[in-house]
Amino acid sequence: MRTVVLVLVFGTIAGAVASAEPGPQAPWGRRSVSLISATGLQRLVEVHVRFHGARRWVIYVDGRPSGFSTATVGYARVTRPGRHRIFAALAGRDNVVLRPLVRSRTVDVMLPRPAGPVVAAAGDIACDPNNVAFNDGRGMAHRCHQLATSNLLVNAGLTAVLALGDLQYYCGALGAFIYSYDPSWGRVKAITYPAPGNHEYQLSGGYDCAAGAQGYFSYWGTAAGDPSRGYYSFDIGTWHLVSLNSNCDEIGGCGPGSTEERWLGADLAAHEGARCTLAYWHHPPFSSRVTQGGAPMTMALLQDLYAAGVELLLNGHEHNYERFAPQTPAGAADPARGIREFVVGTGGADLRPFGAPIGNSEVRQNDTYGVLELTLLPTSYAWQFIPEAGGAFTDSGSSPCH
């Protein structure tokens, strides 16, 4: 990942590819914003400012608003590679720029072109339309952010979207999918590869609930796989991806010798020539959850993945974000052959607390909605958590495949 850092201090920029120009005349006194630095990350710009006499500021990219912040660090979603002009401006209550315009100077930031296909992933997404926080799809402060997170996906140059289960609350009814999920994440339905969560199989708590995740399979059609199974695989570039069903009791089990476990073993064997492999399902085998349980029902699937040298496992369910170091199915650190797990339950429904951190947990947060982006390279991968507009958290890194 190539990074260009630009620093603006007292009107001076340090950096070979930087330029600046004065903004319009503005009352810099007690109400001002000063751009300190802007860093071009992969498909994201990190902006640092100093501001006085205001609580919100808006990031402008190429003259258009692209994110806001109430802290001294903000992130702007930028999906087009190349040079972009960045400035910050003070904002009012609804992130409307104040008049007269009070803005920083402008700097140029260079963003790299992705070196491989980019996929985005998250679970625990769309609120039940009957939820008081649904608010005609707009959501409220702490719940129902499915529209805001879907804005990170639309026209973002993604190859695929991996939907990590509990896509529609409360019971995955077809009507709820059409009214809540479809106007938000449904805008990228054509490139979405879903996995079912427990709420897709829920039989109460919403309207028009139906057994066997009927609403889920009706909405997705053949994209969700055989309705009696709910698992399938596909390829993106040089990577092999496997979408599995962790609702084991609904499909006859996930243990050794089960239909799903035997299918997975055969699928991995048929693609043993793939240098890099990613798997995903809803329930995480590892999480710093509030209440820990016993061995996961998906242990046999996890063991198959480890034996085949799989790189990545993506999950949802916990309504927060957590990244783990590569580890064995028993939870022992294994930097050479371990599976790196990401829990990405930040798709929009709500955010929930952690318990005590467990072994190999590297990064975790439960205050920012967003999606995980993965750049799938021929022999490696890079990750970056993309926060919704106004989010103050991101996480990034890269690793070679086994």
Image: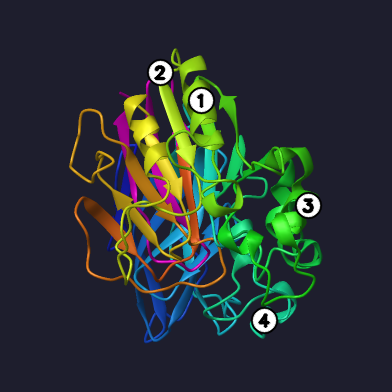
| Gap in angstroms between the C-alphas marked 4 and 2 | 44 Å
SS type, badge 2: loop
Q: Are marks 3 and 2 in contact (CB under 8 Å)?
A: no
Is 182 situated above or below 131? above
Res 1 quadrant in image: top left
Report the span colored magenta: 375-402
Report whether residue 360 is seen: yes
Residue, x 70% and y 56% (percent of image)? 213
Is 218 situated above or below 104? above
**Amino acid on which the number 4 mark rests in the picture:** Asn
**Amino acid on which the number 1 mark rests in the picture:** His
Residue identifier under label 4: 131
The x and y percentages for residue 203 are 68, 69
The x and y percentages for residue 6 are 33, 48
Is 344 situated above or below 335? below
Residue identifier under label 2: 275
| Gap in angstroms between the C-alphas marked 4 and 3 | 21 Å
Residue identifier under label 1: 240
Report whether residue 78 is seen: no
Circle nearer the viewer, 3 or 2: 3
**Amino acid on which the number 3 mark rests in the picture:** Tyr
